[in-house]
Image: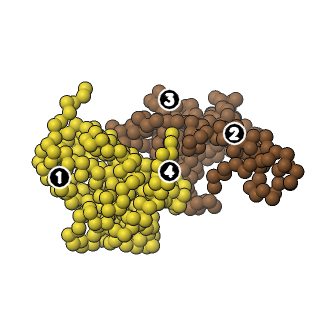
Amino acid sequence: MTQPHPDTQWPRWEIFKQDNEKRPYQGVGSVHAGDPDHALLTARNVFVRRPAAVSLWAVREDDILNATPEEVGTHPEVLDTPGEADTYHVGIKKTHKRSMTFVDLVESVEATGPGDALRQAREQHADALAWLVFPDSAIARTDDDPGTVESWFAPAKEKTYKQQQYYGVIGKHVGELKREGRMPRRATEEPHAGDHKVYDHPHDASPAELKTHEVQKPEVQK
Amino acid sequence: MTAPAMTLSDVQQAALIRKLTALADDEIILAQRGGEWTGHAPILEEDIALANIAQDELGHAGLYLELRRALDGSDADALAFTRSADEFTSARFVELPKGDWAFTMLRQYLYDAYEALWLDAARKSVYEPLAEVANKAFREERFHLQHTALWVERLALGTPESMKRTQDALNALWPYVGQLWQPVEGEGGLIEAGLLPDLNAVKTRWEGLIVPHLTVQCGLILPPGGAEQPGRDTHTEDLAPLLDEMQRVYRAHPDTPYW
């Protein structure tokens, strides 16, 4: 049984998304959910609003065994982790680069248990940064009937997908405001108008500075 | 292939505009209620999910108002953000305050079932632009319905507290839900002409879907049906404060550019 988690009473599920029929399933993140159906529904909302997918898998974290080469070095007994004989899916992490996906599911192996599956993953993919295995029986899958594909995955394909940086602030891009000196260039920087330091209250400035620069308080939108 | 534009009589056009506006108004108000949960839902994932559903509903309002624009040249933003409560034609069912999570999920469930089945029937409309919109929106509504049906079931079968809250929500909502089935003025003529779905047939399907789910599956007790409701020109006192908040930015900065 799943133990209650300190951060939530619901178990965590790792979500694997397939972008199209020819692509591998890729780990995209996790959701907390009460049961497999709930996990898939929330995963669809969290991970498939944009841009595209054809299928989702949800696997409860308790059903996943993962390890880094360092962990296998210090705890070799992980390779003996017991469990059911099954077809195990093997995921590997190949890069530290942060992106939308973290783990690719590269193959499936027949194994006597999760430890054995991890051992095979390690032999096949010695250069991976981390390995992850879970039994086929642990997967909650979205249905592949036309109705499900139409209602879960088709709408996202017709929606515009924009990277975060596409969006500016309303009216003006933040870079433009910075160049005009209407926003601090660094988080810790005091307000400037051009090269001149400005103050919210005139008495904050020394009289000499005010005389020298005749700084006007910029229009600050509260 | 572009279907030849259908010629509507003045009476038909006026009735269709009324119906499209009523459909859009329900979506706008319910989306606003859903949006009120943003940052406050019981768990992050559901916060995102409900915001997603609310955005979809708002998108459907946009589709309906685009159909209206094609008929009378009206502007969707102006309709949404400058009309007063008296001018809105939303049902009181969607105006009621968001309540607790059980109330929100149950209302959304009843609405999603209604909208999904209405849209399903509207896909066969002889008015081609509406059939197209219905095809598009139906897919999203089907997914919403799965999500909210799951929540209603889990709340009703969860703890005594969640069961009580879900039953309370049903008791509070049931007298209002019948308003969704009231035809707008002139709707009967459009139904006869095949432009709009037969409301009674959709209602029968709706009852066949939600009554067993609520009673058999979820163990809830259906309250007795409510008395005859006034029309869409009568609003709850909750609508005006909702519009005040929803329209504040547009009214303060009507010519602000957006992305």
What x and y, as percent, mark residue A68? 70, 39
Q: Quadrant of the N terminus of chain A?
A: bottom right
Dot label at residue A23: 3
- Amino acid on which disc 1 is placed: Glu
List the residue tagged with mark 2: A180
Question: Chain letter for yellow?
Answer: B
Alpha carbon of mark 1 to alpha carbon of mark 2: how far?
57 Å
Question: Chain A hue?
Answer: brown
List the residue tagged with mark 1: B187
Alpha carbon of mark 1 to alpha carbon of mark 4: how far?
37 Å
Circle 4 residues within 10 Å: few <14, some 14–19, many ≥20 = few
Question: Is residue A131 visible to the viewer in this orientation of the structure?
Answer: no
Circle 1 residues within 10 Å: few <14, some 14–19, many ≥20 = many
What x and y, as percent, mark residue B43? 53, 58
Q: Nearer the viewer, mark 4 or mark 3?
A: 4
B69 sits left or right of B127 in the view: right
Name the secondary structure under disc 4.
loop
